[in-house]
Amino acid sequence: MSANLLPGLPAVLTQPTLFAAVPGFGPTTGGNQVLLIGANLAGATSVTFGGTPATIVSQDPFGFLLVVTAPAHAAGNVPVVVTTPAGTSSPANYTYIAPPVTPPPTVVGITPPTGPTTGGTPFTIVGTNLTGASVTFNGVPATNVNVIGGVVLTGLTPPGAAGNATVQVTTPAGSVTVPGGFTYVAPTPPTVTSIIPTTGPVAGGTPFVITGSNLTGAQVTFGGAPATNVVVDPTGSFVAGLTPAGAAGNAAVVVTTPAGSANVTGGFTYTP
């Protein structure tokens, strides 16, 4: 404010006075607007929060109010000071509040600890602070990841090479390695012991059963021609189907799974 009590005398500038900052607190990132209340604030040339300049948004021409944008600053109490051509105000208190610290994730283990190299194994990881987590197996992301209550994480393994893989859980607060990791197991090739019956007509359509092990997902060919109606039992120990048509004589019988192939000893003999 200014005063000119006697005509002809120069105006007298009054030093600014700062009463309060409202609100008196804000985030360390700054960017929030703060109302400064005081007297003789008109014509403010600068406002600082702990020595860091703030942006002046608007001024009350009467010098009572000043709106500023708080700058970023470290957490803690800082003085807010207004400077005008008449001088610098006494400080008002303002408190910078740091965001809450999110603890890093912790994990106990993974279940199951093993699975096929083809991936797709449903897994569960138990721990704490898992919200927002992602999971990698030797750097390859798991799929269908879901977190329940921040303590249980589920998903499907990606494909991987046979052997142990490092499993890492990552959240915005940090990363942690799952103890023991996850062991990829190569699928076991099929083995076959016998076919019943060993002969049938060239027209095909003979019901057959092949016994063995690791037959899950098997396909069967007779002399290179695929059998039909092929069914594998849930244990992978036998496969049944109908023979295709074939030429008279012996035909090689081959059982093929995603893990490999096996020849049936003696094959199958087509009879006229």
Image (cartoon, rainbow, N blue to C red):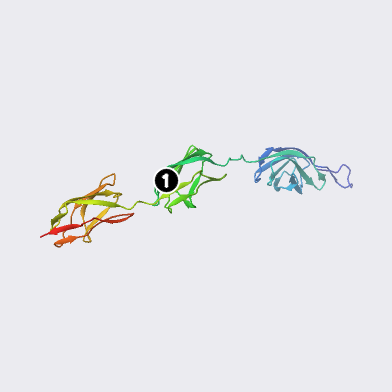
Give the residue at mark 1: 114
Residue lying at 46% horizontally and 49% vertically, measured from the top left: 164
Viewer can see residue 239 = yes
- Residue 118 position (above or below residue 66): below
Count numbered badges in the picture: 1
SS label for mark 1: strand
For the C terminus, which image quadrant?
Answer: bottom left
The amino acid type found where label 1 is placed reads: Thr
Rendered-image quadrant of the N terminus = top right
The answer to which of 255 and 139 lies nearer the viewer is 255
Left or right, 167 with reference to 272: right
Write the residue at 65% across / 44% down. Answer: 32
Taking depth in this image into account, of 24 and 249 the one nearest to the observer is 249
Local crowd size for mark 1, using a 10 Å CA cut-off: few (<14), some (14–19), many (≥20): some
Is 186 located above or below residue 64 in the figure? below
Q: Quadrant of residue 114?
A: top left
Residue 43 in the image: state x and y as whole percent.
77, 47
Q: Residue 50 at what x, y percent from top left?
A: 74, 44
Q: How far from the left and from the top, in percent, is residue 185?
A: 40, 49
Q: In the image, residue 140 lies at what x, y percent?
A: 47, 52
Residue 202 in view: no
Q: Residue at x 30, y 56 (%)?
A: 261
- Left or right: 117 as drawn, with respect to 65: left
Classify 260 as above or below 133. below
